[in-house]
Image: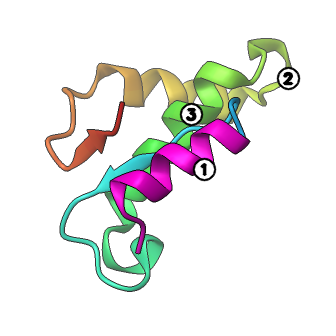
């Protein structure tokens, strides 16, 4: 578990990184909140990976995810 100060320190040490807090996740985020975790990962990769390097399937999945409303389970920490 990270405190807000820990998050700020991490972002200072790795300025190109991002932090997303997934609410109601227990010990293992990917196992406890799989759909929310997947959306966060795909959204990150969609923004940070050049579109030409994504496979056609990945581009299609990314386009579908962009149509979803904002997920209330995601809480970006500034």
State yes or no: discs 3 and 2 in contact (Cβ < 8 Å): no
Q: Which mark is residue 53?
A: 2
Measured in 3D between alpha carbons, the distance from the residue under mark 1 to the one under mark 3, in whole angstroms, is: 18 Å
State yes or no: discs 2 and 1 in contact (Cβ < 8 Å): no
Q: Who comes first in sequence, dot 1 or dot 3?
A: 1
Can you say whether 16 is above or below 6 in the image?
A: above
Can you say whether 51 is above or below 13 in the image?
A: above
Tag nearer the camera, 2 or 1: 1
Q: Residue 67: x percent and y percent?
A: 30, 20
Element at label 3: helix
Can you say whether 4 is above or below 15 in the image?
A: below
Q: Which residue is mark 3?
A: 44
The residue at the point 66 percent across, 34 percent down is: 57
Prevailing SS of the magenta stretch = helix
In the image, 71: left or right of 57?
left
Inspect the magenta stretch and tell me whether residue 78 lies in it.
no
Q: Which residue is mark 1?
A: 10
* The C terminus - image quarter: top left
Q: Who comes first in sequence, dot 2 or dot 1?
A: 1
Please rate how many residues cluster around mark 2, counting C-alpha atoms within 10 Å: few if below 14, some from 14 to 19, many from 20: few
């Amino acid at each position: 578990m990270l405190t807000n100060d820990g998050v700020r320190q991490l972002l200072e040490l790795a300025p190109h990184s991002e932090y997303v807090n997934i609410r109601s996740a227990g010990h293992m985020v990917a196992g406890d909140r799989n759909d929310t975790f997947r959306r966060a990962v795909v959204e990150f990769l969609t923004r940070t990976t050049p579109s030409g390097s994504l496979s056609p399937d990945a581009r299609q999945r990314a386009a579908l995810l962009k149509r979803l409303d904002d997920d209330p389970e995601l809480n970006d920490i500034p």
